[in-house]
Amino acid sequence: MHLFIERLLQFFIPSQCPLCDKFLSEDGKGICTDCLSEIYWIKPPFCSICGTPYVSNVSGDHPCGGCLKKRRYFSMARSIGAYEGSLREAIHRWKYEGKTSLTPYFGQWMVEGLSHYWNPKELDLLIPVPLHKHRLRDRGFNQALLLVKEIHSQIGIPYLKRALRKRKPTPPQVDLNGLERERGVKGAFEITERDKIVEKSILLIDDVYTTGATVNECAKILLEGGAKRVDVLTLARTVKAS
């Protein structure tokens, strides 16, 4: 009976792609194939540390110039797709238009990426990059925490949602260069549950990796607090030709 009602509703109110709003076929659900085909899924070769993809596949994975010049407190960072096209649009709708129905799709992609790059059994904790309380109040949710909860629900890795706190607001990062971003996030985070992170292998979760300044600062604070290792997984990252 439930299936009949669902199909009846779908007939009169067909499902739409949450990105382009195109109506889907009778059995169609989720993001349409056209939008999915526009996503640039990040694959090797890439920087063995921060995950920046390389154009040429001749030399394989190796550290990029940025990681050779600057200290990375995280051991390894990986991202699912490039922050452009339909994925950028999806994240924008998710964060700024409250389209949280996208969360399960993003969570599934994150789980697939996590399982590809890490052994889940070797990760002790998932920790989301926190928002400042003012930003959290305006948005209504922390997008990184939504991803963490999805990953936890699918593969069971424990998480701490308040292990890190953003104690001061930072300027909008969009128009800042790498050095300005580093200065902006310096001292912005603190540990609130130190006893729970000591000697733990932590996977830090965020939505977008731009210069890496935010996750690097978070990783630094976690290591100073006693964490054994910190890695990073983001849904997307900005990509520059390398």
Image: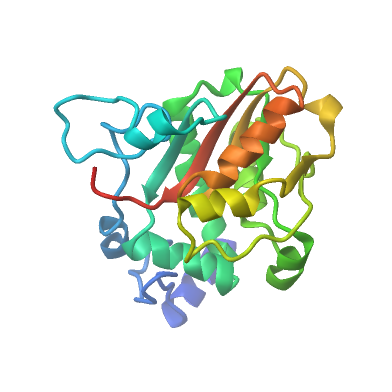
Work out whether residue 79 or residue 67 is closer to the camera in this orientation and state it: 67
Residue 27 can be seen in this image: yes
Residue 31 can be seen in this image: no
Q: Which residue appears farthest toward the bottom when viewing the image? A: 12
Q: Is residue 139 left or right of residue 15?
A: right
Q: Quadrant of residue 85?
A: bottom left
- The colour scheme used to paint the residues is rainbow
Q: Position of residue 162 (x, y in %)?
A: 79, 44
Q: Position of residue 166 (x, y in %)?
A: 75, 51
Q: Is residue 134 above or below residue 9?
A: above
Work out whether residue 28 or residue 93 is closer to the camera in this orientation and state it: 93
Residue at (36, 76) in percent of width and height: 23
Q: Position of residue 106 (x, y in %)?
A: 49, 51
Q: Quadrant of residue 189?
A: top right
Q: Position of residue 94 (x, y in %)?
A: 54, 66
Q: Is residue 124 left or right of residue 174?
A: right
Work out whether residue 134 or residue 181 is closer to the camera in this orientation and state it: 181
Q: Is residue 60 above or below residue 12?
A: above
Q: Is residue 105 above or below residue 125?
A: below
Residue at (18, 24) in percent of width and height: 59
Give the position of the N terminus as an image quadrant.
bottom right
Q: How many marks?
A: 0
Work out whether residue 22 or residue 106 is closer to the camera in this orientation and state it: 106
Residue at (78, 39) in percent of width and height: 163
Residue at (42, 35) in percent of width and height: 50
Give the position of the C terminus as an image quadrant.
top left
